[in-house]
Amino acid sequence: MSDFLAEWQEMLATGRKYKKELDKLKQELASLKDNPRMVQAIQKRKKIRRNLQEKINHSILRIQLKQDLIKGIGPIIENVIENGAEEHLAGLRRDLKVEISELESLKLRLNTLDDPYRKERKRLRRAVREISSQLDEHRLLEMQWLTMDRAHLNWALGQVELVHYNGKDLIRQYVLRFPGEDVSDLLPSKTTVPEIGIGKSYRKKKHKPRKTSLLPQETVPEPDSEDSWSFRIILKKDDLGKLLPTDKEEFKKELQAALVGTDCGGLNAGVAYDKLVLVSEMSKVERSRMKQVHYRDALAGWKSCRAGIKYRLFLLIDEDERCIRFLPKHRRRSFSSH
């Protein structure tokens, strides 16, 4: 059991590290506009933009004057045979081209002027998404570790102050992973009500049922069926999909081979497997509450979940056949046309 404690403390330390970094990033993002360095950078950028805009306005004015001058005296000079007249007109036209070129250069500088606030905000938001994803995956690993076998489960239920997961949630997850195992000894027994003294009257206090309770007091949720789920990879919406092995290592090999040449070649096959297994171990009600695609006709009715930082899995769940067909997509292209 000491080994369990050491491993769990290491996992807790990792989770606290992710949480601390996430809180720090969120605080930086919330106070970004009040950061003295950022305030100074924003003011400097505003000053540069103002100067550039003034130069552009003056340049436009000079160009208009030269254009009017050339338009007005050009025909007169061209009809006068006099030394230097044509050269003067040509010089005006050259000056006009230079002014136009400088104007385009000023506009380009204005349009491509670095925006330190937006750049830093984008960096922080991306960092928050990455750390949040890592924290979610770490919590999934914690739950899997606590319910990997009966010894881990018994240890977790005895560490109320150390394990931050609800005991009923742990039992429910364990039953979903190992549906054939009896865990009735882990459930709380009925409590006896002490006898009330004669002559005293008591009013029974009514308690509202807890909405967050996931298990009845003395019952364990039965799995939908003891049949295992199957996973099929599909690369097009109307494809029936290729059946993948249920063994994790074989699954990873075949999934990686199927994704070669697609925009999901970088998808972590192990993460995808863990996500699919997690969905299959949910109850039917939990699966029905998963995020659903509503706003695209092509994938209407499909479920959606993240698979790492850069990828998303669209799920078509067949409860009768106990089959999950999944369509992996890069997050930047997740809601484009399929």
Image (cartoon, rainbow, N blue to C red):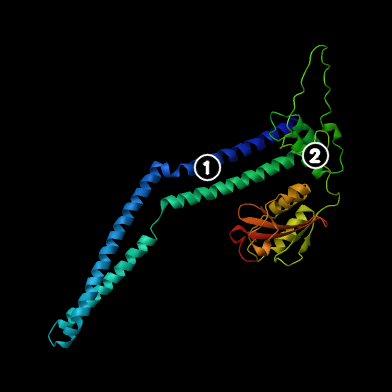
Distance between the alpha carbons at the discs numbered 2 and 1: 37 Å
> Dot 2, crowdedness within 10 Å: few (<14), some or many (≥20)?
few
| x and y percentages locating residue 126 in the rendered image | 54, 50
Look at the numbered disc 1 and give the secondary structure of its residue. helix
Q: 81 above or below 174? A: below
Residue under circle 2? 149
Residue pictured at 41% horizontal, 42% vertical: 35
Which residue type carries mark 2? Asp
Specify the quadrant that holds the N terminus: top right
Farthest residue toward the top? 199
Mark 2 vs mark 1: give the one in front: 1
Q: Quadrant of residue 300?
A: bottom right
Q: 247 above or below 22? A: below
Look at the numbered disc 2 and give the secondary structure of its residue. loop
Residue 283 left/right relative to 309: right
Which residue type carries mark 1? Lys
> Dot 1, crowdedness within 10 Å: few (<14), some or many (≥20)?
some
Residue under circle 1? 26
Q: Quadrant of residue 186?
A: top right
| x and y percentages locating residue 53 in the rendered image | 31, 60
Residue pictured at 71% horizontal, 49% vertical: 289
